[in-house]
Image: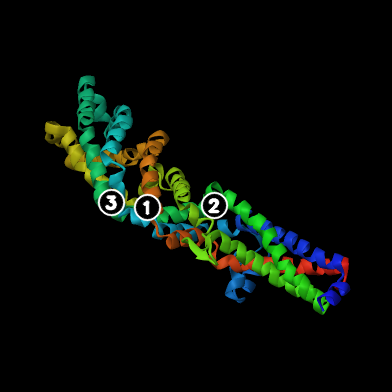
């Protein structure tokens, strides 16, 4: 029977099927990676009425990048879901660093205060002079030079106390002023290339291996396809089985990257997902990107003053600074109140406080100082990410693509279908 089958087989047709499925498998995984990461921004055209049409279609269709925004085109699945990955990353890893207050203490507020004083001190004479000229130019102009210098010197002497009060107040209220989750989500949404970097920087070797395995999986799956095709010889078999092979090839590729999260023996062979087996290296890459680009001292300062709770920060700092300004004026406070009037004195004091608020956190934006503090953030994030249970780590890394994996599988099925028709067109029916 086997001999009769062998005599009837068209061997060129038969042998080319695994080669075809292998090449198609390679193309499926190669183009699937492109779909995952590229382009970083949406590329396409806006279609009038598309948004309204898509809103009534099944939810899975709505998930295709760009459609809900009324566009026909493509954006890489991972960049398109960058904000979601950021949200899960905070929940799984960054939130475990502790509360914002604990996180702030790790940044050593005393060093921050010392740096603020160092950077701010040269600007102090200009600040005092500018406020006094604006609020009470005649009084300031009539004061002798030594008296004006004495006022500046007294304010300068009180500067460490003032700044210490500021950093203490920030630490006391940081839980209400700083939201790391919003910081991460907003930054990932605005900079989706960072999420691509997380995968590329530590996992490029594994991703390349997945493409190679696409050929291996496709070739091996093509052998039973060739056998079935040679037995039944139906014209529609190759396209239909091509759909199955394409779907399975992509599914195996995703499984190869992420599963199983912990080492397991299957048929005596030790199996471990390509990404989870390199969790320590991934943690270092992830922590470096978070510390260098996402939760930086510079961005913390921007968030505190200009973020959604910036008004609260400014009001709190101004309240904290007013007593310090009274202290800086010292024994002359009563005389100054008499000279300029109580209301006018309060206006000058509040104006100085408001100017100080805007400048006090400016040193947070010092890139060199921020870079030095980043090492503390990097160590914290790396340690917590390494401590994540493997399943949580996989969920964090897979979050950006989990709901959209069906697109990759559908893409594999379509390419498998096309490969089946192409083979049928070149070699005919088996």
The residue that disc 2 covers is 199
Q: Badge 1: few (under 14), some or many (20 or more) residues near its Cα, within 10 Å?
A: some
Neighbour tally class for label 2: few under 14, some 14-19, many 20 plus, Cα within 10 Å? some
Look at the numbered disc 3 and give the secondary structure of its residue. helix
The residue singled out by tag 1 in the image is 384
185 vs 122, left or right, is right
In front of the other: 164 or 15:
15
* Mark nearer the N terminus (3 vs 2): 3
Badge 1 or badge 3: first in the primary sequence: 3
Q: Are marks 3 and 2 in contact (CB under 8 Å)?
A: no
Q: Nearer the viewer, residue 73 or 224?
A: 224
Q: Which mark is residue 416?
A: none
Front-lying residue, 261 or 109: 261
Q: Residues within 10 Å of mark 3 (few under 14, many from 20)?
A: some
Counting from the top left corner in percent of width and height, residue 239 is at: 77, 72
The secondary element bearing badge 2 is classed as helix
Nearest-to-viewer mark from 1 and 3: 1
Residue matched to label 3: 101
Looking at the image, which residue is at 36% across and 36% down? 363
């Amino acid at each position: 029977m086997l001999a009769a089958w062998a005599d009837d087989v068209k061997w060129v047709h038969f042998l080319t099927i695994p080669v075809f499925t292998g090449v198609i498998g390679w193309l499926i995984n190669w183009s699937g990676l492109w779909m995952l990461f590229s382009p970083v921004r949406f590329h396409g055209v806006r279609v009038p009425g598309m948004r309204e049409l898509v809103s009534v279609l099944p939810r899975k269709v709505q998930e295709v990048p760009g459609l809900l925004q009324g566009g026909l085109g493509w954006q890489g699945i991972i960049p398109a879901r960058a904000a979601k990955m950021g949200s899960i990353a905070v929940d799984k890893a960054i939130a475990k660093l502790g509360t914002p207050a604990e996180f702030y203490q790790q940044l050593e507020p005393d060093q921050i205060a010392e740096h603020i004083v160092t950077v701010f001190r040269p600007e102090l004479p200009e600040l005092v002079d500018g406020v006094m000229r604006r609020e009470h130019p005649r009084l300031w102009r009539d004061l002798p030079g030594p008296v004006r210098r004495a006022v500046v010197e007294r304010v300068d002497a009180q500067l460490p106390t003032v700044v210490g009060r500021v950093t203490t107040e920030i630490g006391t209220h940081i839980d209400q002023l700083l939201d790391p989750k919003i910081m991460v989500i907003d930054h990932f949404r605005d900079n989706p290339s960072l999420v691509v970097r997380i995968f590329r920087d530590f996992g490029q070797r594994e991703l390349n291996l997945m493409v190679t395995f696409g050929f291996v999986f496709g070739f091996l799956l093509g052998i039973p396809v060739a056998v079935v095709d040679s037995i039944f010889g139906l014209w529609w078999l190759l396209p239909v089985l091509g759909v199955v092979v394409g779907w399975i090839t992509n599914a195996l590729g995703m499984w190869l990257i992420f599963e199983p999260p912990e080492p397991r023996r299957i048929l005596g062979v030790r199996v471990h997902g390509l990404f989870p087996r390199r969790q320590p290296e991934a943690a270092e890459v992830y922590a470096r990107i978070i510390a260098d680009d996402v939760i930086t001292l510079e961005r913390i300062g921007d968030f505190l003053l200009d973020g959604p709770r910036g008004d609260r920060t400014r009001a709190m700092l101004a309240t904290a600074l007013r007593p310090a300004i009274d202290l800086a004026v010292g024994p002359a406070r009563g005389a100054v109140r008499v000279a300029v009037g109580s209301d006018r004195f309060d206006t000058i004091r509040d104006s100085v406080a408001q100017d100080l608020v805007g400048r006090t956190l400016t040193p947070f934006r010092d890139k060199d100082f921020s870079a030095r503090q980043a090492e503390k953030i990097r160590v914290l994030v790396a340690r917590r990410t390494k401590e994540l249970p493997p399943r949580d780590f996989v969920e964090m890394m897979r979050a950006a693509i989990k709901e959209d994996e069906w697109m990759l599988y559908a893409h594999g099925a379509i390419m498998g279908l096309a490969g089946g028709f192409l083979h049928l067109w070149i070699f005919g029916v088996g």
